[in-house]
Image (cartoon, rainbow, N blue to C red):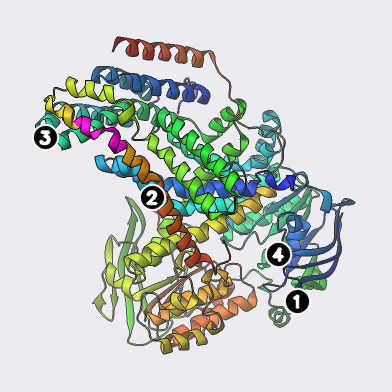
């Protein structure tokens, strides 16, 4: 990504996600939600996530069309249950797009540094880092286990219980090894941990936050 | 500088693992601890870096460890981490972050250092270890060797005076071993104390100052570097030690000649659009043990996965006795012993494990378990077995399922000489029974010992 | 024993790893929530299938805060990727706090206590379908906006009746208890000989 470009501070991002959440749940008209999505889309386009932005927009349009044209023709129960789900989807889309771009453009190091700055509990930061690190490990483990299972003639039940066994076994071993490696590198040091990545709130962050909040506010008021 | 005084240690009261150990290591020395599996050297390492008793609280330890005239008993692990760093043997399970940069500075961040200082230390580590191309990478996209080098960098950045290396090369390839040799040389030059616990010895020839041979929890013999690396091969083998010289592949001929044939013809494999290898031809007779060798990333794993029917070929055929085998059929007649066998143990007792997926009788399973020395353990949970026993358990299952193709992926990683010979014997027995055996390994000594032919995969210039 | 109350690196790593396993199962059901009925049942179904990672954390980290951290990680990941609403944030906070209190009061080693705390913890996910009831008005408005026939309003009324909510609320602890027993049985059967419990 282009370095000189403006980058939203992680704290500002989390704050906007929070505000957006309230905005989304205080409006219900399709137009208002569309305008909220538009704002997120601008963020996405600015960060050059064109495909993702287009996909979200298309899902939005498809949901709206389904809502207006397909559902009213369906029998009552189905129509209503899907209508609830669809309107929920419409509400989630602006948040999800913002969150998607935010998560893609913010490294874990920046997030960690930001959380440390606002004195977020270190134990949660550590836990979060490990959880995120373990997802790809789980995926690797799963593929290996699946390979091994393919070469054995196992029933579905055997496969499921086998998967539980290998998952827990691997988890126990990983906990042991990771704990050793982390302990000898001083994870239990009670001193406040620091970050190599430095983060600071820039004028631009404040500006973006103010404009966004104002925009959200106006939409909520109008609709 | 490091002094171990009257150290004894046991997990249970009766059985002592370390007996009255007294060792003195001077500053700037490079020490190698070697010995058979289970001789107690890992335990010694953990005692020196204070994991015993601070992390493993359940054992019984007596005696003291003095470092720079301080008794480590009263030092917290995080304090000790400032002057002592440890690299462990398994590259996959010792990194904390997904991003290599974050991993390198993990220890520094833990000590609450100023960001500016962290950056300087980081830059220095990258420059000194010459690892620019490993920066800002996803740890999961790296080879085992690369991960291990990041583990070194992470410790190096903390700038400790003492380095403890616990089998750092057990799971990695030739190229990474050379890199690690270079790093250790550098550490020595800088005046650091390096203590290495290893099975793989040859790469340490120009590095170590003294060698301790550990047996049954005591330092049985102490060698000077010259004396040690010039040990007679016979004596070395009797001590259970791996090769002291850089082993080179011997010359292989064509393997067995018989009329039962597994033929791989014009085989090509791809991952997505990326060609891994193409037009590969290889014929294997029943009883052959084929060593698949080649650099990292040339597709050895893909080749054996394809043979086992776990990867779909994009072109070519695999035939057994002139009958073409599709993917499903290959899966039915193949078995694989993975590098990490913990992925393939699915049951809660060894007996059930070896019967999984086949309808063998009690009698048959008893015979096989006895032949593989597993009879005494058949009621135990596979997880409590040793690495070698787990491996044999997977073999037992393969034999009982009557699998013709057997694939071994790095079966000797982290094994001493006796362990390696035991695996070779196992493989030779399977060869006599007419299995088609494929072996992927970096262990040249082992390949020389066991293979009947080799196939070298090369990077094809596209 | 002051020293042992603190959460050490090993404890946090244990929590982190089992939370990853919990999250994967949770996420799978989140995706299944695309089907309307599944969405309402989701909190209960998640409770039924996540007993193992939850109990492993309870078993391995018998200290205050373990479950709170587990919940916080889950919420943070969902939140930062925008798939979570503020409603869930609140339900999760309440669920985790009640779970922690239960564990403390009934004892960290007690299976009963852990099962009950699991039931509270599982209420956290109720926050996902809860907006159906909380923002009922907004759904009515929407139905009118897209021009559905008025008799549909009746169906919506049934759909969002307090009885449905009540049955979901009853279903969650039942499934949690079942899930915990199920998990205990599997762990006992499969791992009692393995030396990792």
Element assignment for label 2: helix
Q: Which chain is indicated by disc 3?
A: A
Label 2 in the same subunit as label 1:
no
Residue range (magenta): C156-165
**Which picture quadrant has residue C101?**
top right
- Quick check: marks 4 and 2 in contact, CB under 8 Å? no
Q: Position of residue B254 (x, y in %)?
A: 43, 80
- Residue at image x 70%, y 53%? B86
Q: Main secondary structure of the magenta part?
A: helix
Distance from disc 2 to disc 3, alpha carbons, whole Å, reads 33 Å
* Measured Cα–Cα span from mark 2 to mark 1: 67 Å
Left or right: B131 with respect to B429?
A: right
Which is in the foreground here, disc 2 or disc 1?
2
Residue labelled with disc 1: B231
Chain letter of the residue beneath label 1 in the structure image: B
Determine crowd level at label 4: few under 14, some 14-19, many 20+ residues with C-alpha closer than 10 A. some
């Amino acid at each position: 990504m282009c370095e000189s470009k403006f980058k939203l501070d992680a704290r500002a991002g989390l704050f906007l996600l929070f505000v957006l959440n309230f905005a989304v749940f205080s409006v219900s008209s399709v137009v208002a939600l569309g305008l909220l999505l538009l704002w997120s889309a601008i963020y996405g386009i600015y960060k050059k996530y064109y495909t993702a932005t287009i996909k979200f927009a298309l899902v939005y349009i498809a949901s709206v069309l389904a809502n207006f044209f397909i559902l009213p023709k369906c029998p009552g129960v189905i129509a209503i249950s899907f209508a609830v789900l669809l309107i929920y989807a419409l509400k989630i889309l602006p948040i999800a797009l913002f969150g998607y771009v935010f998560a893609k453009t913010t490294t874990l190091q920046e997030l960690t540094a930001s959380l440390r700055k606002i004195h977020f509990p270190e134990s949660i930061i550590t836990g979060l880092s490990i959880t995120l690190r373990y997802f790809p490990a789980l995926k690797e483990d799963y593929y290996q286990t699946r390979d091994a299972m393919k070469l054995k003639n196992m029933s579905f039940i055997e496969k499921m219980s086998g998967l539980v066994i290998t998952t827990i076994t691997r988890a126990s071993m990983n906990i042991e090894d990771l704990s050793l490696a982390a302990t000898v590198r001083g994870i239990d040091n009670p001193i406040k941990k620091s970050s190599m990545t430095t983060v600071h709130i820039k004028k631009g962050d404040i500006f973006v936050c103010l404009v966004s909040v104002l925009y959200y506010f106006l939409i909520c008021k109008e609709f | 500088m490091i002094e171990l005084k009257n150290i004894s240690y046991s997990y249970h009261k009766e059985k002592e693992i370390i007996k009255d150990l007294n060792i003195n290591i001077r500053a700037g020395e490079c020490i190698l601890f070697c010995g058979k599996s289970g001789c107690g050297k890992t335990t010694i390492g953990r005692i020196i870096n204070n994991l015993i008793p601070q992390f493993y609280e359940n054992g019984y330890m007596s005696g003291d460890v003095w470092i720079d005239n301080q008794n480590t008993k009263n030092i917290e692990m995080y304090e000790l981490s400032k002057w002592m760093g440890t690299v462990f043997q398994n590259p996959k399970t010792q990194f904390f972050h997904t991003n290599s940069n974050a991993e390198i500075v993990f220890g520094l961040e833990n000590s609450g250092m100023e960001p500016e200082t962290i950056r300087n230390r980081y830059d220095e580590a990258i420059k000194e270890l010459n690892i620019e191309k490993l920066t800002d990478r996803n740890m999961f996209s790296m080879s085992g060797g690369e991960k291990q080098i990041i583990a070194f960098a992470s410790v190096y950045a903390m700038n400790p005076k003492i380095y403890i290396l616990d089998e750092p090369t057990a799971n990695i390839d030739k190229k990474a071993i050379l890199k690690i040799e270079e790093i250790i040389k550098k550490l020595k030059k800088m005046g650091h104390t390096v203590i290495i616990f290893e099975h793989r010895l040859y790469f340490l020839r120009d590095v170590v100052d003294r060698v301790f041979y550990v047996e049954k929890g005591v330092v049985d013999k102490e060698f000077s570097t010259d004396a040690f690396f010039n040990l007679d091969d016979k004596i070395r083998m009797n001590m259970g030690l791996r090769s002291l010289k850089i082993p080179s592949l011997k010359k292989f001929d064509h393997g067995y000649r018989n009329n039962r044939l597994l033929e791989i013809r014009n085989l090509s494999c791809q991952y997505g659009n990326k060609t891994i290898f193409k037009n590969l031809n290889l014929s294997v007779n029943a009883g052959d043990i084929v060593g698949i060798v080649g650099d990292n990333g040339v597709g050895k794993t893909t080749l054996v996965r394809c043979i086992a029917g776990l990867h779909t070929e994009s072109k070519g055929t695999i035939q057994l006795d002139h009958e073409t085998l599709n993917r499903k059929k290959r899966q039915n007649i193949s078995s694989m012993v993975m590098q990490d066998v913990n992925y393939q143990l699915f049951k809660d007792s060894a007996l059930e494990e070896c019967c999984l997926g086949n309808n063998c009788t009690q009698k048959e399973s008893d015979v096989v378990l006895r032949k593989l020395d597993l009879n005494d353990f058949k009621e135990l949970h596979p997880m409590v077995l040793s690495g070698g026993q787990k491996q044999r358990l997977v073999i037992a299952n393969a034999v009982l399922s009557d699998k013709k193709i057997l694939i071994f992926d790095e079966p000797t990683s982290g094994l001493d000489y006796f362990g390696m010979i035991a695996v070779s014997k196992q493989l030779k027995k399977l060869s006599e029974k007419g299995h088609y055996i494929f072996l992927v390994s970096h262990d040249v000594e082992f390949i020389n010992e066991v293979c009947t032919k080799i196939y070298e995969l090369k990077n094809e210039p596209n | 024993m002051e020293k042992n109350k603190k959460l050490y690196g090993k404890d946090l790593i244990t929590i982190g790893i089992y939370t990853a396993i919990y999250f994967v199962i949770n996420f799978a059901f989140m995706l299944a929530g695309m089907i309307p009925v599944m969405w309402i049942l989701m909190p209960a179904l998640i409770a039924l299938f996540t007993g193992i990672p939850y109990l492993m954390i309870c078993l391995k980290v018998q200290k205050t805060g373990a479950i709170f951290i587990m919940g916080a990680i889950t919420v943070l990941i969902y939140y930062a990727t925008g798939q979570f609403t503020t409603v869930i944030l609140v339900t999760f906070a309440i669920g985790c706090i009640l779970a922690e209190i239960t564990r403390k009061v009934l004892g960290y080693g007690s299976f009963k206590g852990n099962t009950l705390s699991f039931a509270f913890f599982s209420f956290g996910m109720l926050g996902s379908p809860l907006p159906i009831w909380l923002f009922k008005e907004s759904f009515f408005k929407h139905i009118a906006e897209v021009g559905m026939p008025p008799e549909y309003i009746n169906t919506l009324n049934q759909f969002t009746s307090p009885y449905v909510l009540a049955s979901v609320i009853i279903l969650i602890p039942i499934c949690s208890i079942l899930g915990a027993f199920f998990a205990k049985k599997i762990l006992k059967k499969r791992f009692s000989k393995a030396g990792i419990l």
